[in-house]
Structure formats: structure tokens, C-alpha cells
Amino acid sequence: MYWAEFFTVALIHLLAVASPGPDFAIVVRESVGAGRRAGIFTALGVGCGIFVHVTYSLLGIGLIVSQSIVLFNALKWLAAAYLLYIGFKALRAKPAAANTGESEQPRLERSPRAAFMTGFVTNGLNPKATLFFLSLFTVVINPHTPLLVQAGYGVYLAAATSVWFCLVAMLFSQQRVRAGFARLGHWFDRAMGVVLVGLGIKLALTEMH
């Protein structure tokens, strides 16, 4: 009965998740810099961050945030500050020691928990995701659709997001890919820092529509 609605939700989500943004940038950076395990845990964190948006959408809190300039701006500035923080950290990356040869070991030491939280916070604080899920749950999904079904959509969205970014992590953590980026060394970290700072600034300048 709800298959048509589900496929609409799935298609819209696919188009949204495939668009490069903070989630993509952070998963790529973790995968290249710290290896496959860190990349996958970051991807899982991004996926679990979806539950934050789904929960407040089902509870109607997202509507309150979208109508409150103060709350929206608070969320926006918090997310922007986080992106700027990790971006500036990446910009400060230093060249590897001269006697350090190419190694298969990750250049960054990242615990699974730290990687997971990086992905979770990046996605969970994104106000653009707030507006996206609010639109999804108020415009695309019929308000008469049972909450249990809507929650099922949410589980799918979180799982699909995790799978997508796990694939991204697996691609960018391949030894051949990482070796290519490793030749750029700290310049890759700095380039990703520029991307993250740029996304943070863009986010900070976002206006509520």
C-alpha cells in the first residue's frame, strides 16, 4: 500500500545522498588519512546521524526549528563551527618526516569511537539535513501514513546512507587510491581542510527559507 511512497522517498534520498557535501568530505578524509576501518566507522556515524533527523521529524520538532530563526541559526552556527574546527585542524597538517618512507600504516591514528562520532556529529548538526528531512516528512510523506511505517522509512534512510558512505570509504581506502593521495602527503590534508572550511563558511551564510 505504501510502496509508491517508499520508492519516492528512496529516490529523493538517493539523489540527495549522492550530492557531495560535508558527509562526503569527512568520510573521504578519514578513509584516506586513517584507513578503511576509520572510514567505515565514520560512514556508520553519518548513517546513525540520520536517526537524529528522523526522530525530530516524527516528533514535529523539526517544524519548530524551521520556523524559529533563533533555533535554526543556533544549529547552523554550531554545525559551521564544527566544520571550521576540523577544517582548520586539517589545514595545519605538517609534512611527514624526511626519513619516513611510504608505509601501509594509516597516517592518522583514529579509534573507531572517534571516527564514528566525527561522522555522527557532522551529519547530526547539519541544518540543511534538518530542512531536507522536514520537507521529506511533511511534503513527500503523507501525514496520514502510520508512524510505524514512517519510522520504517527512517530505518531505511539510515541504512541506505550507511551503505552508500561505506562504499565511499571502501573506494577511497583502497591501497592504490591511498598511495596516490599519500604522494601528495600533507597537501591532501590541507586541500580537504580548505574544502571543510569552505563548507563551514557556506553553511554559516545559509539563510532559512
Image (cartoon, rainbow, N blue to C red):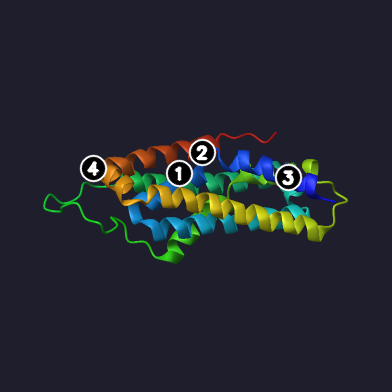
Q: Which residue does the numbered mark 3 point to in the structure image?
A: 7
Residue occupying image coordinates x 39% and y 65%:
111
Question: For residue 158, which quarter of the picture?
Answer: bottom right
Secondary structure, mark 1, is helix
> Do the residues bearing badges 2 and 4 touch, measured as CB atoms within 8 Å?
no
Secondary structure, mark 4, is loop
Residue occupying image coordinates x 85% and y 51%:
1
Q: Earlier in the sequence, mark 4 or mark 1?
A: 1
The residue nearer to you, when weighing 81 against 7, is 7
> Within 10 angstroms of label 4, few (less than 14), some, or many (20 or more) residues?
few
Question: For residue 50, which quarter of the picture?
Answer: bottom right
Alpha carbons under labels 2 and 3: distance apart: 22 Å
Q: Earlier in the sequence, mark 2 or mark 4?
A: 2
Question: For residue 115, which quarter of the picture?
Answer: bottom left
Q: Is residue 85 visible?
A: no
Residue occupying image coordinates x 72% and y 54%:
153
The residue nearer to you, when weighing 109 against 160, is 160
Q: Say if 153 sits above or below 92 in the image.
A: below
Q: Tell me the amino acid under the disc marked 2.
A: Pro
Q: Which mark is residue 25?
A: 1
Q: Tell me the amino acid under the disc marked 1.
A: Ala
Q: Position of residue 30 (x, y in %)?
A: 40, 52
Alpha carbons under labels 4 and 1: distance apart: 19 Å
Q: Position of residue 155 (x, y in %)?
A: 68, 58
Q: Tell me the amino acid under the disc marked 3.
A: Phe
> Do the residues bearing badges 2 and 1 touch, measured as CB atoms within 8 Å?
yes
Secondary structure, mark 3, is helix
Q: Which residue does the numbered mark 4 point to in the structure image?
A: 183
Alpha carbons under labels 3 and 1: distance apart: 27 Å
Q: Tell me the amino acid under the disc marked 4.
A: Arg
Residue occupying image coordinates x 65% and y 58%:
51
